[in-house]
Image (tube, rainbow, N blue to C red):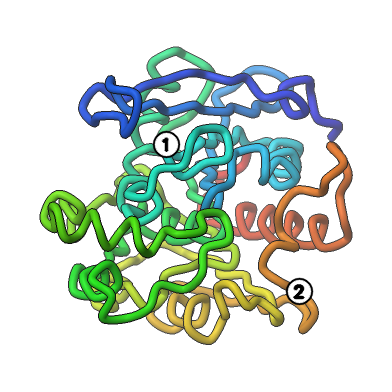
Amino acid sequence: MDPGADAVTPLVLDFADPERAAWAPAGPRPLRTSLWRPRGAGPWPVVLLSHGTGGSARSLAWLAEAVVEAGWAVLAVDHHGNTATQDHQAAAFLRAWERPLDLSRALDLAVGLGLGLDASRVVACGFSIGGYTAAALCGARVSRPGFEALVSGRIALPPVPEYPGLAGELRRYWEQDPDGLLAGCEADVSDGRVQAAVLLSPGIGALLELESLARVRCPVLVVSGGADQTTPAATNADVYAEHLPAAQSIRLGDQVGHYDLLDAPTPGERTPLHRRVAHLTVQFLESLPGARWTP
């Protein structure tokens, strides 16, 4: 069906989480949230959507719009301090475990407003570090020793184009307050409402607690590009696919790089790759067991 007005222009909700502090300025953690909704009356099943490092909800509009056309609502958060819509904060680029909490809280707040969302039918989806976010909502955890090695300099932090100089800033944070920097690192940030996940070129494969992946029972679709030099499949997507018991893995073409999955520069433009990945995502959503997933 044709997308409704909300599918083209999402409703933007300036939520905040009073239980967590903002990096700057002082106050509750902002949760700038974009909500795309189908035509007609809900309640609709929900896809929670998480952008990549330094990105935004807008960077995945191509996917949100396709999912909405298929009858799902999409709720996406600009992750505070790690988004193109706000000033970057070094610690926010490290503390990936904050991201799943952003989406859980945004879902709480959106459901409370009576916006037609069915919180009993929820799937998580994310790109790059957002792929980790989606997996974490299903129960994946990260390894503190791995993060300690990263921020202390024992292993090199790969270049982060969105934040030159990140490694040096994190090293200073670590030297000043190591426990504060990694507070909550090993916490369970899963959300029992999330019952499946789609991981698009997921990251931080080397920092995962593999035993936690083995305990995840959600159906998971893992999609990766054959030419991804930012989150190479061998050390990222393949780690998820191998250790998640209910995972299915799809490798895109040998020429598909990491940033090919971002939105096109021209608003509304959709590449053949966008259309293919959107089709794979919707097909996965429609394959979930039980008629209750039918929008």
Q: Nearer the viewer, residue 29 or 91?
A: 91
Disc 1 secondary structure class: loop
Which SS class for mark 2?
loop
Q: Residue 100 at x, y = what percent?
A: 36, 46
Q: Which residue is mark 2?
A: 256
Quadrant housing the N terminus: top right
Q: Where is residue 132 shown, x and y percent of the image?
A: 43, 61
Give the left or right position of residue 26, taking residue 294 as reference: left
As drawn, 285 above or below 40? below
Badge 2 amino acid:
Val
Q: Relative to 177, is 70 on the left or the right? A: right
Q: Quadrant of residue 119?
A: top left
* Residue 90 seen in the current view: yes
- Residue 245 showing in the rendered view: no
Foreground disc of the pair 1, 2 = 1
In the image, residue 256 lies at what x, y percent?
A: 76, 74
Residue 130 coordinates in the image, percent (x, y):
49, 54
Where 86 sits versus 185, above or below?
above
Q: Residues within 10 Å of mark 1 (few under 14, many from 20)?
A: many
Could you tell which of marks 1 and 2 lies nearer the N-terminus?
Answer: 1
Q: Looking at the figure, which quarter contains the C terminus?
A: top right
Residue 234, above or below 87: below
- To which residue does mark 1 refer? 80
Q: Is residue 116 left or right of residue 136?
A: right
Mark 1: amino acid: His
Residue at 49% from the left image edge and 65% from the top image edge = 220
Residue for point 68% across, 75% down: 225
Crowding at dot 2, Cα within 10 Å, few <14 / some 14-19 / many 20+, comes out as some
Cα–Cα span, label 1 and label 2: 29 Å
